[in-house]
Amino acid sequence: MSIEKIVEQALQDGYLTPAMEAEVGRICDNASELSIEEYMALDRLMGALLTGEVVAVPRKQFINVMEELVLTEAIARVAEIEATSESSLDVGDIAAYALNRLPPLYATTEEGANYQRIRAKAELQELISQQVTEAISRNLDQPANDNRTPVLGKNTGNEVLRQVSTLLQVYAPSFEQK
């Protein structure tokens, strides 16, 4: 959508939504130079915002309380395991696995977040623990190199250079000019 159309829509509706604001920002960031029409549209929008003809809708701030609870559980459990064994676990992978299997608990205020925490601890703590346990189990069962990250072999000399070159070609294919 163009800046002109976004401004027309905002003037028609009387509101500038966060999505509209982000689109205008994206267009401005990506354009090397704006046209006269785009500058005029932005000027009309600015005037409408200043007079109150158009109201900017604030971004709604919200949190997912489940993320806090899962991270707390995962960090505590991983710390126990890593303190008593040679295993190294990825807290991010564990939390993501568990969160994908648990209901979200969004809140927009601190009171709402406190309500969600109390409710989750009463009704969902066992399920949270169960999902974190399963995530840890799956994480421990993965081989050291599960092909997500290429690892250099234990070779020397030209073989290492070839492997590094291959990695660079994969991760930065257009880095070198030919």
Image (cartoon, rainbow, N blue to C red):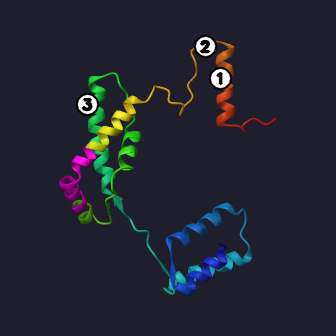
For label 1, count other residues whose C-alpha is less than 10 Å away and answer few (under 14), some (14-19) or many (20+).
some
Magenta-colored span? 115-129
Does residue 101 lie above or below 92 as drawn?
A: below
Q: Which badge, 1 or 3, comes first in the chain's sequence?
A: 3
Q: Which badge, 2 or 3, comes first in the chain's sequence?
A: 3
Residue 125 within the magenta-colored segment of the rendering:
yes
Location of residue 167 (image quadrant): top right
Q: Position of residue 120 (x, y in %)?
A: 23, 55
Is residue 89 visible in this depiction of the protein? no
* Residue 80 tag number: 3
For label 2, count other residues whose C-alpha is less than 10 Å away and answer few (under 14), some (14-19) or many (20+).
few
Q: Are marks 1 and 2 in contact (CB under 8 Å)?
A: yes
Relative side of 155 to 69, left or right = right
Mark 1 and mark 2: Cα distance apart in space: 9 Å
Does residue 114 lie above or below 157 as drawn?
A: below
The N terminus: image quadrant: bottom right
Q: Name the secondary structure under disc 1.
A: helix
Q: Name the secondary structure under disc 2.
A: loop
Residue bearing mark 2: 155
Three-letter residue code for mark 1? Gln
Location of residue 4 (image quadrant): bottom right
* Residue 14 tag number: none
Q: Name the secondary structure under disc 3.
A: helix
Q: Position of residue 148 (x, y in %)?
A: 53, 34
Q: Nearer the viewer, residue 67 or 61?
A: 67
Three-letter residue code for mark 3? Glu
Mark 1 and mark 3: Cα distance apart in space: 37 Å
Q: Residue at left 72%, top 37%?
A: 175
Q: Are marks 1 and 3 in contact (CB under 8 Å)?
A: no
Q: Nearer the viewer, residue 111 or 143?
A: 143
Q: Position of residue 91 (x, y in %)?
A: 37, 38
Residue bearing mark 1: 163
